[in-house]
Image (cartoon, rainbow, N blue to C red):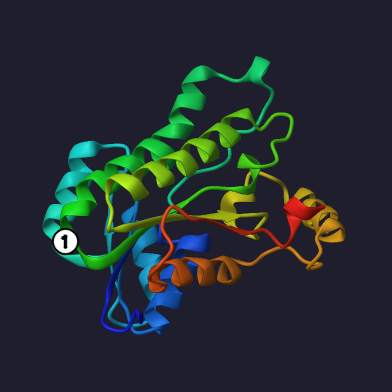
Amino acid sequence: MTLHGKRVVVLGGTAGIGLATARAAADEGAEVVVASSRQSTVDKALTELPSGATGLALDLRTESAIAEFFAELGEFDHLVYTAGGLLQVGALAETEMTAARDFFEVRYWGAMAAVKYATPYLRSGGSITLTSGGTSQRPQSGWTTPTAVCGATEALTRALAVELAPLRVNAVRPGLVRTDLWRNLSETDRAVLYEQVERTLPVGRVGEPADIARGYLYLMTQEYGTGVVLTLDGGHLLV
């Protein structure tokens, strides 16, 4: 299967892995639509994407807004969901439950609502690709909330692959990637984190958004796998 002439919607497609995936799909000849919460970030992303790409602001916390978005968008071929804010990391004893619930709002409930309202408009042979993370397989102390979200997303992926068949539903499970996800750390702390992880990874480097984008393109264009969670972590789970 090729992406040439296909319509690809990337929710969270204005930065990091989402933007890299939108760019890679456009380079393959897809008509790309990106969306995120702020119009300013959408406008900036469109300056970085090939001509022909379009974008809209979308509040993924509001079910009615999601329903309206897909109704206005009409038919398309592939949905990619990479939306999510800063990581909610910290010891459970110090975790504010409101903040933990808020973390689920976009990353999990937004994804479920997007699938619900996108499905009627997905063409035959299309696909949905969600986003998890390596913490689902290797939790760390203080990562209870992100681990729970990633685990829930992977379970959702498998359930949807059964319920929505023959529509293919898969997920990508990235490891550490150089994105704005870590912008709450100082530049020095980020550099230390990347250096520490690089020393342990079999591939010898931290991932870049373009590395992970190739995984989304693969899951869109292959025609046989569904319910798959594709790990792209530089070998982190092996060491």
Residue 107 lies, with reference to residue 101, above or below; the image says below
Q: Residue furthest right?
A: 199
* Residue highlighted by disc 1: 73
Q: Residue 29 at what x, y percent from top left?
A: 34, 84
Looking at this view, is 152 or 227 the one in front? 227
Q: Is residue 130 left or right of residue 60?
A: right
Count up the numbered dots: 1
Residue 83, can we see it? yes
Looking at this view, is 8 or 219 the one in front? 219
Q: Residue at x 53, y 37 (%)?
A: 151
Quarter occupied by residue 9:
bottom left
Q: Residue at x 16, y 65 (%)?
A: 75
Residue 110 lies, with reference to residue 233, above or below; the image says above
Looking at the rendered structure, the kind of residue marked 1 is Leu
Q: Residue at x 66, y 33 (%)?
A: 143
Q: Residue 145 at what x, y percent from top left?
A: 57, 30
Q: Residue at x 78, y 51 (%)?
A: 193
Q: Quadrant of the N terminus?
A: bottom left
Q: Residue 153 at what x, y percent from top left?
A: 46, 41
Residue 48, can we see it? no
